[in-house]
Image: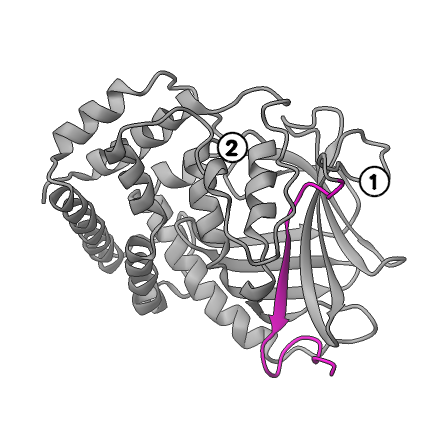
């Protein structure tokens, strides 16, 4: 193969770092556009890349990272082989079978990257040089980088295999749960792509300072959120499991005790959060305190039920509050709240029944 494992990691690192040259760094330049497009409208062309023109090969590499081919191959490989990792524990016995599967996994990724170079009539060495030439800042905010760098590392591979096996087990458990009382979110879900406003997603990550290259990946990935499982023990905890294109399988457990604790966000960065069940408004609230883009406030994720055209859906909302005591989240210049809403439909036989 053209690429070694270290070269694979280096290409992704260099390509992401190269984008930081063109990222806007001030709050004013991150002010979201006043446009309010329809819910299913694609991201505005002018906001896909908010800096000067870059080499077409780098743009092509960004497109390569956001298409479904590579991620689809990774997802298929994990789905077909995750059963070998059921019950696996980090730090436990490392089976020879797992090492062999990791070798096959890395070779598969190398073949896709080799195909990219062949299609664009370039080589790994040329890509390294080109990406290095435009790379003016190697200190890109680590909140956005780790998952891409780790794509080929064994720890990332093992965690995704383990999470995929755990999701399969969680689906079996969720299928046996009955929603008890007025507020229980347990169940298996499917993303309502017809209700996804990708411009809301793009504007949110633009506001937080996410580089254009990574925003492009996140927006593309948000349309392919899958394997969604919620295990909710009212007043006690909420476990949220899902698969996100390019970032792999994720599992987050939130203890609903309203206490400030340290935890990792989806990027692996340690943040301070508190989680609680708000029975007055029938929501689970997860608050990340004093993020870099709101140093005096907090970012809030909420999970709740919402009726949409007579159908009861679970909705995941993300909002930003400028100050800790604010009651209303930040708005953009058009008066819309900054932050996306993702709707999820309970799959047959799980969660709360749809209402017509």
SS label for mark 1? loop
Q: In this view, does 291 lie to the left or right of 220?
A: right
Residue under label 1, please give it: 328
Q: How many marks?
A: 2
Color encoding of the figure: one colour
Q: Distance between the residues labelled 1 and 2?
A: 23 Å
Q: How crowded is mark 1: few (under 14 residues within 10 Å), some or many (20 or more)?
A: few
332 within the magenta span: no
Q: Give the x, y percent position of residue 42.
A: 50, 52
Res. 19 in view: yes
Query: Around disc 2, counting alpha carbons within 10 Å, would you say few (fewer than 14), some (14 to 19), or many (20 or more)?
Result: many
Q: Is the magenta stretch mostly helix, strand or loop?
A: loop
What is the quadrant of the N terminus in the image? Answer: top left
Residue 187 place in picture, x, y as percent: 63, 72
Earlier residue among tags 1 and 2: 2
- What residue is disc 2 on? 210
Query: Image height check: is 208 above or below 134?
Result: below
Q: Which residue is more in the foreground, 294 or 28? A: 28
Residue at far right of view: 280
Residue at image position (59%, 28%) is 30
Above or below: residue 191 compared with residue 71: below
Instruction: Write down the region rendered in magenta.
Output: 335-356
* Above-or-below relation of 52 to 214: above
Residue 180: image quadrant is bottom right
Rendered image quadrant of residue 288: top right
Q: Nearer the viewer, residue 3 or 17?
A: 17
Look at the image and tell me whether residue 264 can be seen: no
Secondary structure at badge 2 equals loop
**Which residue is depicted at the point 58% across and 23% down?**
29
Circle on res. 252: none
Residue 269, compared with residue 317, is above or below; it is above
Q: In the rendered image, which quarter contains the C terminus?
A: bottom right
């Amino acid at each position: 193969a053209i690429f070694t494992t270290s070269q694979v990691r280096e290409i992704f690192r260099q390509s992401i770092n190269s984008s930081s040259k063109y990222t806007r760094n001030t709050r004013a330049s991150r002010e979201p556009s006043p446009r309010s497009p329809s819910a299913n409208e694609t991201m505005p062309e002018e906001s896909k890349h908010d800096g000067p023109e870059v080499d077409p090969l780098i743009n092509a590499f960004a497109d390569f990272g956001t298409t479904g081919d590579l991620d689809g191959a990774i997802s298929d490989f994990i789905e077909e082989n995750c059963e070998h990792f059921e019950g696996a524990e980090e730090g436990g016995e490392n089976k020879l079978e797992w090492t062999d599967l990791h070798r096959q996994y890395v070779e598969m990724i190398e073949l896709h990257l080799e195909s990219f170079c062949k299609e664009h009539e370039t080589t790994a060495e040329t890509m390294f040089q080109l990406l290095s030439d435009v790379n003016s800042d190697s200190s890109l905010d680590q909140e956005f980088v780790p998952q891409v760098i780790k794509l080929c590392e064994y720890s990332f591979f093992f965690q995704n295999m383990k999470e995929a096996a755990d999701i399969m087990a969680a689906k079996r458990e969720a299928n046996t749960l009955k929603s008890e009382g007025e507020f229980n979110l347990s169940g298996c879900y499917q993303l309502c792509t017809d209700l996804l406003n990708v411009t809301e997603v793009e504007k949110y990550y633009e506001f937080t300072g996410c580089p254009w290259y990574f925003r492009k990946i996140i927006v593309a990935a948000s349309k392919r959120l899958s394997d969604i499982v919620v295990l909710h023990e009212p007043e006690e905890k909420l476990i949220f499991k899902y698969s996100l294109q390019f970032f792999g399988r994720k599992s987050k457990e939130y203890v609903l005790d309203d206490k400030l604790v340290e935890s990792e966000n989806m990027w692996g960065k340690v943040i301070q959060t508190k989680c609680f069940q708000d029975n007055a408004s029938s929501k689970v609230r997860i608050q990340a305190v004093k993020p870099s883009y709101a140093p005096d406030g907090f970012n809030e994720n909420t999970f709740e039920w919402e009726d949409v055209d007579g159908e009861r859906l679970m909705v995941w909302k993300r909002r930003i509050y400028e100050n800790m005591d604010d009651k209303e989240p930040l708005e953009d210049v058009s008066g819309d709240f900054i932050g996306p809403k993702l709707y999820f439909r309970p799959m047959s036989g799980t969660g709360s029944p749809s209402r017509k």
